[in-house]
């Protein structure tokens, strides 16, 4: 939690620095506009003095950003200064999750399969089939367990039938009804999560 707060603070400081730097490069910006010193300190103040104060504040922001970066590197361990995971250190779990999400978001086949799944006309029919299969498997499970008298065999039979039920509901029925988009969607997620590759 502390690392998340530090990251958010660092992002805010970085955004402020980038904004100030962009304003200095822009001739129409407020920080280089000669009207700014008069607005900030009154008509009688020295514009050079005001500009020196702005430059000093930017320097303070830079030093704060460097200190925050050092603290983040110390906290994150495997992070490089540019925010990328260090191959030697392996990166933090949060960074690995972010990298996998970026891989998924940049995979065209994955994005197309997600769109096809969302627009698939057979989704309501699939939900009805899943519900019917679930009720059918409950009846089969109760019937088969009533035939078994030993408690351990009954427990193992219930476990096996429950696993079979959820595999059918979660993968087999959607793969049959929705077809290739569902298979591409799930295999891509599994490949990225399990192996970290595209």
Image: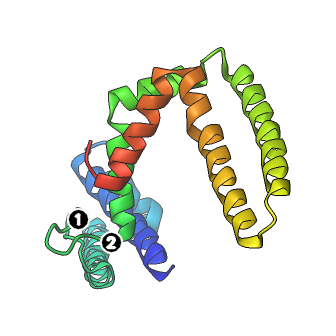
Q: Identify the residue at image location x=77%, y=69%.
A: 150
Q: Are marks 2 and 1 in contact (CB under 8 Å)?
A: yes
> Relative to 12, does residue 147 appear above or below in the rendering?
above
In front: 20, or 81? 81
Q: Identify the residue at image location x=81%, y=65%.
A: 149
Residue furthest to the top in view is 121
Q: CA distance from mark 2 to mark 1?
A: 7 Å
Q: Identify the residue at image location x=62%, y=39%.
A: 168
Q: How is the image coloured?
A: rainbow
User: SS at mark 2?
Assistant: loop
> Relative to 177, does residue 83 appear above or below in the rendering?
below
78 left or right of 122? left
From the image, tell me which residue sits under label 1. 85
| Residue 86 spot, x, y in % from top left | 18, 68
32 left or right of 111? left
> Relative to 102, does residue 60 appear above or below in the rendering?
below
Residue 171 visible from this viewpoint:
yes
From the image, tell me which residue sits under label 2. 92
Crowding near the residue tagged with mark 2, few <14, some 14–19, many ≥20 C-alpha atoms within 10 Å: some
> Relative to 45, does residue 130 appear above or below in the rendering?
above
193 left or right of 121? left
Which of the two discs, 2 and 1, labels the residue nearer the N terminus?
1
| Residue 26 spot, x, y in % from top left | 26, 45
Crowding near the residue tagged with mark 1, few <14, some 14–19, many ≥20 C-alpha atoms within 10 Å: many
186 left or right of 79? right
| Residue 175 spot, x, y in % from top left | 53, 28
User: SS at mark 1?
Assistant: loop
In front: 163, or 155? 155
Residue 31 visible from this viewpoint:
no
């Amino acid at each position: 939690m502390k690392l998340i707060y530090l990251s958010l603070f660092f992002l805010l400081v970085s955004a402020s620095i980038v904004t100030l730097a962009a304003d200095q490069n822009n001739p129409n910006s407020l920080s280089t506009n000669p009207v700014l010193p008069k607005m900030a300190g009154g008509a009688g103040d020295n514009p050079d003095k005001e500009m020196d104060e702005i430059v000093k504040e930017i320097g303070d922001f830079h030093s704060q950003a460097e200190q925050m970066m050092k603290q983040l590197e110390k906290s994150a361990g495997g992070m490089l200064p540019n925010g990328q995971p260090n191959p030697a250190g392996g990166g933090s779990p949060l960074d690995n999750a972010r990298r996998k999400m970026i891989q998924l978001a940049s995979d065209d086949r994955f994005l197309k399969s997600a769109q096809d799944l969302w627009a698939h006309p057979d989704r309501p029919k699939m939900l009805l089939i899943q519900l019917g299969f679930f009720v059918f498997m409950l009846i089969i499970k109760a019937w088969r367990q009533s035939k078994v008298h030993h408690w351990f065999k009954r427990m193992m039979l219930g476990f096996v039938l429950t696993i079979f039920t959820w595999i059918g509901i979660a993968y087999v029925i959607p793969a049959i009804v929705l077809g290739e988009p569902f298979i591409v969607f799930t295999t891509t997620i599994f490949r990225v999560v399990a192996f970290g590759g595209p």
